[in-house]
């Protein structure tokens, strides 16, 4: 499979054995500025200057760093502020930029100067017994509103990744740091559906097939019977936690005429059998699907598993080295376009991708490592990859 992207190191951990690079995110701001973010976690974050979240991947908490580039990603400088959150989502709404994350409350920070400075995070929702969870995604905008999904853990003691999905919406021009400007769906609990799947699949005694890290996509006419004209509905694509099987979960997000939000299932070809588990490249790990309005195509950055059974049930840990770009007309039938990156060693991941369209190019940030990385999960780099003329790749593939 041909290599279709270059690679540059965007950020390097100051201590690869104790400060780890987790969630990367990208956003194209005003005047072509590129904003990148990463949340740092690990036992060494206690030594970092600046605030940290109260709940993190390690007891010391996480810290989001934000970086700015005005030359297309060639050079970077850090913004003036560091944020006490993790699992950040960067997006643009109205004249402001936002970073949504958890600390463990659901919190949000705003920048009114194109990413130079960021406000103290405001709390949107708080529940001491149910921390929030997600990874970097890209909101969808329709009719002056933005739509995304964030997730919340079920009470302590449940088997990971036991999270519930909330479909969220807010008007683009409002102050999104005010909780009253947001609408939330009731939580969606996929556990009963996942439990049925467990009985049919070779998962191992300690493996639970929950869904998590859910993305929002528009439903285009190319999606066949999933598309309903006049309905304000969305594809919600979830990672399906397995040892490496290429499966994902598909949910339906709906905004009803009265503005209320709901998560449900799409009907299958037979109405009595709704759609839920679908073939999905790299679906056992965090992936990033993105809809391109210009081409009306779906693009997907995901890891391609090299093994499921070899070495025991460690698929999501040991399948993070190769990152591939895929394309689809219906967000279900995917065709590979080429290799985005391949790590130089087994501990050198290229995973947890996040994409942003920049003119005719596709930018992809990855949670990465080199030979100094602690392992494929606890990474020491954020890398930036540029796929030039990405739409031409889809045309060449006949999509």
Image: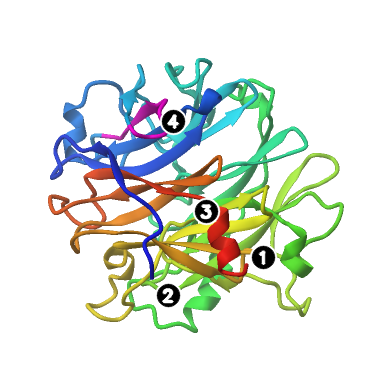
3D distance between C-alphas at marks 2 and 1: 21 Å
Q: Residue at x 33, y 72 (%)?
A: 206
Q: Which residue is mark 4?
A: 35
Q: Residue at x 75, y 32 (%)?
A: 144
Element at badge 3?
A: helix
Q: Which of 390/55 is in front?
A: 390
3D distance between C-alphas at marks 4 and 2: 33 Å
Element at badge 4?
A: strand
Q: Quadrant of the rendered structure where residue 78 is?
A: top left
Q: Is residue 7 left or right of residue 292?
A: left
Q: Which residue is mark 2?
A: 245
Q: Which residue is mark 1?
A: 330
Instruction: Please give the range of residues in magenta.
Output: 61-74
Q: Earlier in the sequence, mark 4 or mark 2?
A: 4
Give the answer, above or below, for where 211 lies relative to 354: below
Q: Residue at x 51, y 58 (%)?
A: 300
Q: Which residue is mark 3?
A: 390
3D distance between C-alphas at marks 4 and 3: 20 Å
């Amino acid at each position: 499979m041909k290599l279709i992207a270059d690679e540059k190191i965007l950020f390097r951990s100051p201590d690869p054995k104790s400060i780890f690079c987790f969630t990367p995110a990208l956003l194209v701001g005003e005047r072509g500025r590129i904003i990148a973010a990463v949340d740092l976690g690990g036992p060494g974050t206690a030594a970092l200057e600046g605030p940290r979240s109260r709940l993190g991947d390690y007891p010391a908490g996480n810290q989001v760093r934000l970086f700015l580039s005005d030359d297309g990603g060639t050079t970077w400088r850090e913004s003036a502020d560091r944020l006490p959150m993790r699992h950040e989502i960067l997006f643009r709404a109205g004249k402001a930029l936002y970073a949504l994350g958890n600390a463990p409350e659901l919190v949000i920070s705003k920048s009114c100067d194109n990413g130079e400075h960021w406000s103290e995070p405001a709390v949107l929702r708080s529940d001491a017994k149910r921390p929030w969870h997600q990874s970097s995604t890209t909101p969808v905008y329709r009719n002056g509103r933005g739509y995304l999904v964030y997730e919340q853990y079920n009470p302590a003691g449940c088997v990971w990744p036991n999270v519930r999905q909330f479909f969220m919406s807010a008007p683009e021009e409002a102050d999104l740091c005010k909780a009253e400007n947001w609408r939330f769906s009731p939580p969606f609990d996929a556990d009963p559906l996942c439990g049925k799947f467990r009985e049919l699949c070779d998962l191992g005694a300690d493996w639970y097939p929950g869904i998590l890290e859910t993305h929002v996509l528009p439903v285009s006419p190319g999606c066949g019977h999933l598309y309903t004209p006049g309905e304000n509905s969305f594809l919600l694509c979830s990672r399906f936690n397995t040892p490496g099987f290429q499966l994902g979960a598909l949910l339906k997000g709906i905004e009803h005429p009265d503005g209320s939000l709901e998560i449900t299932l799409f009907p299958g070809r037979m109405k009595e059998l709704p759609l839920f588990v679908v073939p999905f490249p790299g679906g056992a790990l965090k992936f990033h699907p993105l809809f391109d309005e210009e081409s009306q195509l779906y693009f997907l950055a995901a890891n391609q598993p090299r093994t499921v059974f070899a070495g025991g049930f460690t698929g999501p840990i040991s399948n993070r080295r190769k990152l591939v770009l895929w394309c689809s007309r219906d967000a279900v039938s995917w065709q590979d376009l080429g290799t985005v990156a391949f790590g130089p060693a087994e501990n050198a991941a290229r995973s947890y991708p996040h994409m942003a369209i920049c003119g005719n190019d596709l930018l992809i940030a990855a949670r990465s490592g080199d030979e100094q990385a602690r392992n494929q999960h606890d990474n020491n780099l954020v890398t930036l990859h540029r796929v030039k003329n990405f739409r031409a790749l889809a045309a060449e593939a006949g999509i």
